[in-house]
Image (tube, rainbow, N blue to C red):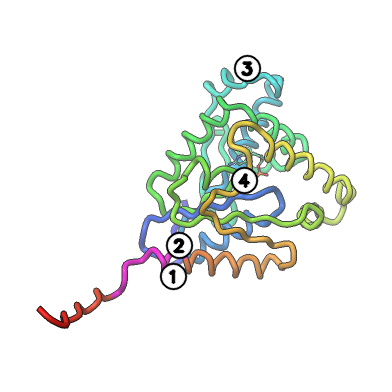
């Protein structure tokens, strides 16, 4: 695990920052930045669903069979190791970090994540991971289900076209997909994430909404930083207790 950089303004408290939102909204960039800036550990829960999706694909377990997926989960361990730039994901102790970003696994992760037994298992793992606090955790249900008492909740969103183009730009110089295909895939994943019966993607009532449609990622990072600062200042006890006022008469 990486330790916070020495010159970060460590907040010295075991807070939890929950970042939720759809794919391509900039969650990972923002979570990474906030973790570094505030001296917190960064835990990316989507990687855990991706690792499980990969295992189901490898084993040939039907992605629409909750009982089979539940049995599979019982013989699976998934661990996140926090690194400086990204989490390493260990599936049954195998490092699968480089194997979980392709389109097949992306789709499988979204499919397996609709089933309550899979979610209950993941939520338990994530609550154990974050039990000590001092974390930024990003996903879809962190502020609503995993850590409903998180001190700071940010719901990050952006228009699907903008999110799709950001994803497309990340595909590198010889992209395997056209922009329209990336946007179409993203929309169908959005639909599944937002409409599943168990813990659909939606903002917690006390989340701060951050729409990055018209922002650069840099601007969104700064806005997120300001939200955390503001929330922490609001939650902090006053620096000095107020001087008692003298009663006018006694
Ligand atoms: O954040 P991501 O795109 O890597 O997530 C992959 C899939 O996992 C996503 O389609 C929905 C699911 N997911 C979820 O249901 N709950 C989370 N907390 C994180 C991810």
Circle 3 SS class: helix
Circle 1 SS class: loop
Mark 2 and mark 1 residues within 8 Å of each other at the beta carbon: yes
Q: Residue at x 63, y 59 (%)?
A: 29
Q: State the separation of the CA atoms marked 1 and 4.
A: 31 Å
Circle 4 SS class: loop
Where residue 22 appears, as percent x and y from the top left, is 68, 48
Where 39 falls versus 116 (above or below)?
below
Which residues fall within the magenta stretch? 231-239
Q: Which residue is mark 1?
A: 9
Q: Residue at x 76, y 54 (%)?
A: 163
Q: Which residue is mark 4?
A: 202
Who comes first in sequence, dot 4 or dot 2? 2
Q: Which residue is mark 3?
A: 68
Residue closest to the eye, 240 or 111: 240
Q: Is residue 107 left or right of residue 75?
A: right
Where residue 209 appears, as percent x and y from the top left, is 61, 58
Q: Residue at x 46, y 51 (%)?
A: 1
Q: State the separation of the CA atoms marked 1 and 3.
A: 46 Å
Q: State the separation of the CA atoms marked 4 and 3.
A: 28 Å
Q: State the separation of the CA atoms marked 3 and 2.
A: 40 Å
Who comes first in sequence, dot 1 or dot 3? 1
Q: Residue at x 53, y 21 (%)?
A: 75
Task: Farthest residue to the left: give it.
Answer: 250
Asked if the residue at label 4 sits under 8 Å from ligand 1, the reply is no
Circle 2 SS class: loop
Where 71 falls versus 55 (above or below)?
above
Q: Of the residues tagged 4 and 2, which is closer to the observer?
A: 4
Q: Which residue is mark 2?
A: 39
Q: Of the residues tagged 1 and 4, which is closer to the observer?
A: 4
């Amino acid at each position: 695990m990486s330790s916070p950089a020495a010159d970060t303004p460590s907040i010295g408290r075991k807070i939890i920052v929950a970042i939720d939102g759809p794919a391509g909204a900039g969650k990972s960039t923002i979570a990474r930045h906030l973790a570094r800036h505030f001296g917190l550990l960064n835990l990316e829960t989507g990687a855990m669903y991706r690792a499980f999706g990969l295992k189901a694909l490898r084993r040939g377990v039907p992605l629409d069979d909750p009982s089979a997926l539940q049995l599979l989960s019982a013989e699976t361990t998934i661990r996140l190791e926090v690194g400086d730039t990204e989490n390493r994901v260990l599936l049954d102790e195998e490092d699968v970090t480089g194997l979980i970003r392709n389109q097949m696994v992306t789709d499988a992760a979204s499919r397996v994540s609709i089933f309550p037994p899979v979610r209950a298992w993941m939520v338990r793992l994530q609550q154990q991971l974050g039990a000590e606090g001092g974390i930024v955790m990003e996903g879809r249900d962190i502020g609503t289900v995993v850590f409903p008492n998180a001190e700071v909740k940010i719901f990050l969103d952006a228009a699907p076209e903008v999110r799709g183009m950001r994803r497309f730009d990340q595909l590198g110089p010889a992209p395997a997909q056209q922009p329209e295909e990336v946007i179409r895939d993203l929309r169908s994943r959005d639909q599944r994430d937002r409409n599943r019966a168990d813990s659909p993607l939606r903002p917690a009532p006390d989340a701060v909404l951050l729409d990055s449609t018209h922002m650069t990622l840099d601007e969104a990072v700064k806005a997120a930083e300001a939200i955390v600062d503001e929330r922490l200042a609001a939650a902090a006890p006053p620096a000095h207790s107020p001087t008692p006022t003298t009663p006018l008469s006694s």
